[in-house]
Image: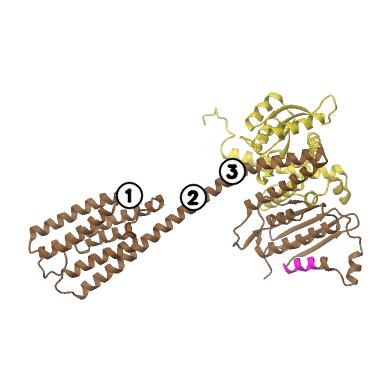
């Protein structure tokens, strides 16, 4: 997805703190994004999402219900091309992992600088994933937890790349160290997330089938 | 007897225990009443049968009344217990008339246990002791001769009263302390929930101040940096609260311990690990934390006091891997070997030795311009 000046990315900022909402919105506008909506709660976010069709959400996890994880799952369900960047203050690890499994492709802590935020939004808008070392550590831990059960596995190379991200190396440093292209590193990182998200969807579907939710409600059985 | 009649506690947990005990006592009262009636009918040795029947009827009526009266907490007043004891003593005394002064078995027999145990439940061991003493004294006083069996009964009565009272008291105290602990846990959970909300708000503001301050530059940037430090400290504190095991526990959370090390190093350290605690023996955690402190102190010494560093904790099935990395100038190849040849390799050898003592392995990756990266692989179980 390439963006030119005449066609800026449509962004929605979701945060219950007005100060943050304004600051992030201002920064994104100044960087050339089209901030089409802001929302202070999960309900508001879903309503504005349907009305304003943003392509990208900058989403705080701690918002009045439904929370950031549910909002992520719902917008991806409605439009799988939607990108979600999690911008979180406290970094509640369970929630960050849940949001990523629900389909968010980027995670940033709020103490990141404005430049880091703009760069992250640009990358997520392009379809890339934005990892912090913290998120890489969580995802590594999740794969190791899943190792004992049937589920997605990382290749040796993906594990290697993810470990380097978790140790704080930039994609460029990783590319240099492994003597591969920047794009290859990016692809490896992206794969680690998409496998996890796919696994999540498969599990949801299996759960839905188990619960009989796949049956036509009109069907009298 | 002020201590005996002291105002009753209103702790619902204590009252609930009392309720159960009185329900059990109600069953016992019926059993001992039926026993007394059956024995008296079987023996049929009343000197004044009409009076004897009247006493048995009165005992039955009192039993029914007592079961009703003790069923509700607010009716368990001292007057009820005193009346209960009075009825019991009266039934004992009636034996003198009903059976004559040369009787062997009293009319109420074991029926006296009802009032005795009520006193024990209500006033604990003191109540049980006093009630047992009163009943025993009356029982012995009205007999013209005392047999081995009489003595044995009195002895059992004197032992049972205080012991049952003591057990009732213990049960009530245990119920009270369990209820208090449950209340404390609920209050703590609520406090933690509220704290989470407050902390999130504070973190938001600190992050915003840090961000805006840095952008404004000058003195504002200093404020921003301070806010950033506080943000880090608070984040660490929250994580500690979430994962800290009891201080007397034999295990500790390695991630939490390393985050604390990172926070107190003064460097800009990013710690990452699996979600949730990585629990290991407390001694192992303390030792790894001490080694990490040494590593980060080295970073501060060789790279600078505001250097960036990364700590990664990986939890594998039988071992834990800790990586500590910086982006400093690194150590040129050959330097360490040269230093070792000169017999000085203090820090590096000390780190390797300490990890080896944990049954693990410490690997050092470094070269000019590549920073320093330590990787510690430590078995989950301490070496035997």
Q: Residues within 10 Å of mark 1 (few under 14, many from 20)?
A: some
B286 up-or-down from A87: above or below = below
Residue closest to the eye, B205 or A41 = B205
Circle 1: element type = helix
- Percent x, y for residue A196? 71, 44
> Residue under circle 2?
B183
Query: In the image as oriented, which residue stretches furthest toward the bottom?
Result: B148
- Percent x, y for residue A56? 74, 32
Are marks 3 and 1 in one subunit? yes
* Residue B326 appears in view: yes
In the figure, what tint was chain B given? brown
- Percent x, y for residue A127? 79, 36
Q: Residue at x 55, y 29 (%)?
A: A217
> Residue under circle 3?
B194
Q: Residues within 10 Å of mark 2 (few under 14, many from 20)?
A: few
Range drawn in magenta: B350-358
* Residue A106 appears in view: no
Q: Earlier in the sequence, mark 3 or mark 1?
A: 1
């Amino acid at each position: 997805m390439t963006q030119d000046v005449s066609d800026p990315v449509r962004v929605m900022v979701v945060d219950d703190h007005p100060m943050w909402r304004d600051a992030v919105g201002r920064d994104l506008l100044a960087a050339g994004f089209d901030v089409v909506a802001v929302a202070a709660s999960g309900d508001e976010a879903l309503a504005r999402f349907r009305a304003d069709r943003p392509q990208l959400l900058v989403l705080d996890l701690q918002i009045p219900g439904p929370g950031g994880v549910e909002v992520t799952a719902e917008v991806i369900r409605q439009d799988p091309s939607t990108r979600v960047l999690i911008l979180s203050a406290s970094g509640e690890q369970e929630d960050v992992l849940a949001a990523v499994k629900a389909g968010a492709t980027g995670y940033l802590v709020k103490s990141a600088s404005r430049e880091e935020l703009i760069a992250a939004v640009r990358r997520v808008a392009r379809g890339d994933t934005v990892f912090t070392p913290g998120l890489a550590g969580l995802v590594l831990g999740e794969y190791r937890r899943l190792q004992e059960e049937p589920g997605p596995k990382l290749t040796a190379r993906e594990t290697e790349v993810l470990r380097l991200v978790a140790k704080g190396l930039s994609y460029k440093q990783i590319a240099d160290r492994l003597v591969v292209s920047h794009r290859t590193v990016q692809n490896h990182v992206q794969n680690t997330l998409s496998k996890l998200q796919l696994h999540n969807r498969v599990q949801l579907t299996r759960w839905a089938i188990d619960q009989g939710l796949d049956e036509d409600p009109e069907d009298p059985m | 007897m002020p201590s005996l009649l002291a105002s009753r506690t209103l702790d619902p947990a204590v009252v609930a225990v009392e309720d159960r005990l009185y329900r059990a006592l109600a069953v016992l009262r019926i059993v001992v009443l039926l026993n007394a009636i059956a024995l008296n009918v079987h023996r049929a040795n009343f000197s004044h049968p009409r009076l004897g029947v009247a006493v048995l009827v009165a005992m039955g009526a009192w039993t029914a009344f007592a079961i009703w009266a003790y069923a509700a907490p607010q009716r368990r007043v001292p007057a009820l217990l005193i009346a209960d004891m009075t009825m019991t003593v009266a039934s004992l005394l009636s034996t003198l008339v009903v059976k004559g002064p040369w009787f062997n078995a009293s009319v109420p027999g074991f029926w006296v246990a009802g009032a005795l145990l009520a006193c024990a439940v209500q006033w604990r061991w003191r109540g049980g002791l006093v009630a047992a003493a009163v009943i025993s004294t009356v029982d012995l006083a009205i007999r013209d001769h005392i047999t081995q069996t009489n003595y044995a009964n009195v002895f059992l009565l004197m032992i049972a009263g205080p012991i049952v009272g003591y057990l009732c008291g213990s049960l009530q105290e245990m119920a009270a302390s369990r209820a208090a602990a449950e209340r404390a846990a609920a209050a703590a959970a609520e406090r933690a929930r509220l704290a989470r909300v407050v902390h999130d708000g504070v973190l938001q503001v600190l992050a915003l101040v840090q961000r805006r301050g840095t952008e404004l530059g000058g003195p504002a940037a200093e404020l921003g940096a301070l806010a950033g430090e506080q943000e880090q400290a608070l984040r660490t504190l929250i994580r500690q609260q979430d994962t800290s095991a009891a201080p007397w526990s034999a295990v500790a959370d390695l991630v939490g311990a390393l985050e604390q090390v990172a926070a107190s190093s003064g460097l800009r350290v990013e710690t990452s690990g699996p979600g949730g605690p990585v629990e290991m023996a407390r001694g192992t955690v303390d030792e790894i934390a001490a080694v990490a402190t040494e590593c980060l102190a080295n970073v501060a010494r060789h790279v600078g006091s505001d250097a960036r560093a990364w700590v990664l904790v990986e939890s594998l099935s039988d071992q834990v891997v800790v990586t500590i990395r910086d982006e400093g100038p690194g150590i040129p190849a050959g330097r360490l070997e040269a230093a070792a040849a000169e017999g000085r390799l203090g820090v590096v050898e000390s780190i390797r030795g300490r990890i080896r003592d944990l049954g693990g392995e410490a690997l050092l990756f470094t070269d000019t311009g590549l920073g320093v990266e330590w990787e510690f692989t430590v078995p989950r179980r301490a070496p035997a």
